[in-house]
Image: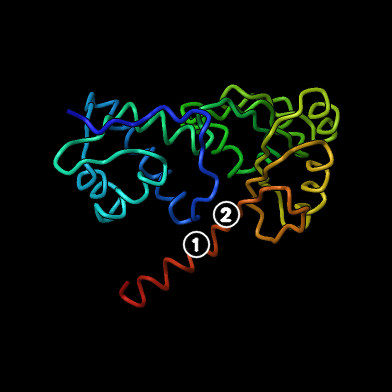
């Protein structure tokens, strides 16, 4: 027997704490790996070990999604992938544009994990003449001057910002004006955008500082 996951396609919870959202993303990643290994069921203790959290935390996170847990039996890997994907937005196709094709942008274009999670990089933009016109990861790099025209013609929901800090605010404001609803910001600066715009900041230097602190403090 497996723990059933009811059909809640139209009942997606929106009030989930950010730490839980982060853990759900980790569960999602590991569940895909399990499916690739042809593993069909898993219990909360086993899933918790994969992401270094306790089984009670796993059960609490999954119960918030409407899943039903029973002691001593396992969850269906396929059913959990479907349910977590619905909640995280990976159950639909998200079109994404990338602005800034330096070393980081280049790596993002080559990353193959986006499509599995429902994200399609549709266009990339840069100001470097040596980059413009090249194709990286199957995506052509366009002149940044074409950003407004291309995005207006086919508005994406999301954008990845990998530009220098000095340019980030201007580019982000333009993206919002063109209809982008969410921005993943790799620029080391705080964006001041309307509250309706979802922004996730990824400051690699700050994350390294957190890591150094954790090592130094022994945590």
**Which residue is situated farthest in the left direction here?**
72
Q: Quadrant of the C terminus?
A: bottom left
Judge the density around disc 1: few (<14), some (14-19), many (≥20) Cα neighbours within 10 Å: few
Q: Residue at x 81, y 33 (%)?
A: 147
Expressed as whole percent of the image width and height from the top left, the position of residue 36 reads 29, 25
**Which residue is situated farthest in the bottom direction here?**
217
Q: Nearer the viewer, residue 181 or 86?
A: 86
Which is more N-terminal, label 1 or label 2? 2
Expressed as whole percent of the image width and height from the top left, the position of residue 122 reads 66, 25
Q: Residue at x 50, y 62 (%)?
A: 207
Q: Quadrant of the N terminus?
A: top left
Secondary structure of the residue carrying tag 2 is loop
Judge the density around disc 2: few (<14), some (14-19), many (≥20) Cα neighbours within 10 Å: some
Q: Residue at x 55, y 62 (%)?
A: 205
Say which quarter of the image contains residue 141.
top right
| Disc assigned to residue 202 | 2
Secondary structure of the residue carrying tag 1 is helix
Say which quarter of the image contains residue 94.
top right
Asked if residue 45 is positioned above or below residue 2 in the image, the reply reads: below
Q: Are marks 2 and 1 in contact (CB under 8 Å)?
A: yes
Q: Nearer the viewer, residue 184 or 40?
A: 40
Expressed as whole percent of the image width and height from the top left, the position of residue 14 reads 55, 45
Q: Residue at x 26, y 54 (%)?
A: 56
**Spatial CA span between label 2 and label 1:** 8 Å
Does residue 20 appear to the left or right of 147 in the view shown?
left
| Disc assigned to residue 207 | 1
């Amino acid at each position: 027997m497996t723990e059933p996951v009811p059909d809640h396609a139209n009942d997606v919870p929106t009030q989930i704490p950010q730490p839980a959202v982060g853990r759900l993303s980790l569960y999602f990643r590991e569940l895909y790996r399990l499916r690739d290994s042809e593993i069909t069921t898993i219990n909360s203790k086993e899933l918790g070990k994969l992401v270094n959290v306790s089984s009670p935390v796993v059960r609490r996170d999954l119960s918030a999604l409407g899943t039903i847990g029973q002691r001593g039996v396992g969850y269906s890997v396929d059913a959990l992938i479907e349910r977590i994907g619905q909640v995280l937005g990976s159950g639909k196709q998200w079109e994404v544009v990338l602005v800034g094709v330096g070393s980081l942008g280049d790596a993002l274009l080559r990353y193959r994990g986006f499509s599995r999670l429902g994200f399609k990089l549709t266009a990339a933009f840069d100001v470097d003449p040596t980059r413009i016109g090249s194709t990286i990861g199957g995506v052509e790099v366009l002149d940044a001057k074409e950003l407004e025209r291309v995005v207006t013609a086919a508005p994406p929901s999301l954008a990845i910002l990998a530009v220098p800090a000095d340019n980030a605010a201007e580019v982000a404001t333009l993206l919002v004006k063109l209809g982008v609803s969410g921005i993943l910001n790799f620029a080391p600066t705080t964006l001041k955008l309307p509250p309706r715009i979802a922004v996730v900041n990824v400051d690699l230097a700050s994350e390294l500082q957190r890591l150094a602190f954790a090592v130094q403090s022994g945590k």
